[in-house]
């Protein structure tokens, strides 16, 4: 059955990557129902390979977060929604890199939170990935400490072209998606993105072997990924902010500064989603969400911060989301994996 599915493979060359959402010609044209096998490079474009490779010396700002894409989705028009289901996300290497970067991160002075303190020292940690045991090995610099953490692969950057002729850096999250850095963007999850331009122009990158909520130092366990996605176009259903659906939760992501505005965006969007699709008035949805919501932080370090609002499906009235495609995409993913 899997062999009969439309499967397209893309392994970009160095010249194929893009660094923005919007403003770049499509890498390829794809159709609703296609399954894509993709390679994505890490956020450093593969240039940080040892503890001696300091980001400020080997990387060229703003050429960070190379994206695989964009993909022009046939028939996608403004007002539609692109559903992107993550079939699998697997590290392409047995190592990953994380760093501190001067004037970047949640617990240091930054360009926008300016102080007279000197920047934190710049350091690189190389994490060893055991892809069979599904672990990430941390080795301390200043002691003999080693700690294994569970592998939890995800994509930090997933998005479409923005509205209003905008071109946004791949470092920025907003209503189009982008660099949201939420650990919820893992295999088995469907991401819903509102289409703003003809063809949607979908891209993704910034693979993380794992990341804590908030991405506090600004850098996750960064690695190249072999990722399989399957896509579906939902016609005539708008999506104002990125939404996610797993087997157990529906989720919304809001990105802004200050952080409380990102929180408000995610919470309002979740309330409106529950009201629209599950037969509740907005005030009743507000009360239900207030008492049942989980509110993890995605990032508190990027150009915009990202907050997530999660609601267990078990807490929702019986009914089906207007998207109505997550279960179908799960079946398609299972067929691909079985093949």
Image: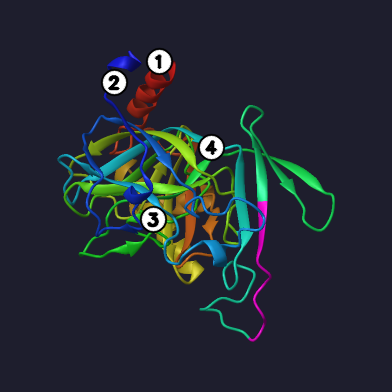
Q: Which residue is mark 1?
A: 339
Q: Earlier in the sequence, mark 4 or mark 2?
A: 2
CA distance for labels 1 and 4: 20 Å
Q: Residue 113: percent from the left, percent from the top?
A: 55, 79
Which residue carries the number 4 mark? 91
Which residue position holds label 2? 5
Q: Give the Cα separation between the discs numbered 3 and 2.
A: 28 Å
The residue segment tinted magenta is: 116-125
Mark closest to the chain's N terminus, 1 or 4: 4
In front: mark 4 or mark 3?
Answer: 4
Q: Residues within 10 Å of mark 2 (few under 14, many from 20)?
A: some
Nearer to us of marks 1 and 4 is 4
- Marks 1 and 2: in contact by CB < 8 Å? yes
**How many other residues sit within 10 Å of disc 4, few (<14), some (14-19) or many (≥20)?**
many
For marks 4 and 2, give the one nearer the viewer.
Answer: 4
Distance (Cα) linking label 1 and label 3: 31 Å
Q: CA distance from mark 4 to mark 3?
A: 20 Å
In primary-sequence order, the first of circles 4 and 3 is: 4
Residue identifier under label 3: 178
């Amino acid at each position: 059955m899997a062999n009969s599915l439309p499967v397209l493979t893309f392994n970009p060359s160095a010249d194929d990557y893009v660094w923005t959402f919007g403003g770049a010609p499509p890498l390829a044209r794809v159709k609703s129902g296609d399954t894509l096998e993709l390679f994505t490079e890490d956020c450093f474009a593969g240039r940080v390979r040892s503890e001696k490779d300091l980001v400020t010396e080997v990387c060229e700002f703003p050429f960070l977060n190379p994206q695989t894409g964009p993909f022009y989705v046939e028939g996608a028009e403004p007002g539609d929604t692109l559903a992107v289901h993550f079939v699998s996300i697997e590290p392409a290497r047995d190592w990953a890199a994380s760093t501190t970067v001067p004037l970047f991160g949640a617990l240091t002075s930054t360009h926008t939170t300016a102080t007279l303190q000197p920047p934190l020292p710049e350091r690189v940690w190389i994490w060893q990935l055991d892809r069979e045991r599904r672990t990430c090995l941390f080795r301390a610099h200043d002691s003999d400490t080693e700690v294994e953490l569970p592998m939890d692969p995800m994509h930090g950057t997933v998005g479409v072209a923005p509205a209003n002729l905008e071109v946004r850096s791949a470092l920025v999250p907003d209503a189009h998606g982008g660099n949201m850095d939420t650990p919820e963007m893992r295999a088995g999850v469907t991401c819903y993105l509102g289409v703003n331009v003809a063809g949607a122009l979908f891209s993704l990158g910034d693979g993380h072997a794992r990341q804590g909520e908030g991405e506090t130092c600004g850098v996750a366990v960064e690695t190249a990924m072999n990722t399989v996605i399957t896509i579906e176009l939902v016609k005539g259903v708008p999506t104002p902010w990125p939404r996610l659906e797993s087997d157990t939760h529906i989720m919304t992501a809001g990105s802004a500064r200050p952080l409380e505005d990102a929180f408000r965006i995610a919470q309002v969007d979740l309330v409106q989603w529950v009201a629209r699709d599950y037969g509740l008035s907005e005030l009743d949805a507000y009360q239900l969400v207030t008492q049942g919501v989980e509110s993890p932080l995605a990032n508190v370090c990027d150009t915009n911060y990202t907050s997530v609002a999660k609601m267990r499906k078990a807490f929702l009235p019986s009914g089906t989301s207007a998207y109505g495609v997550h279960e179908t995409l799960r079946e398609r993913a299972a067929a691909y994996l079985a093949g």
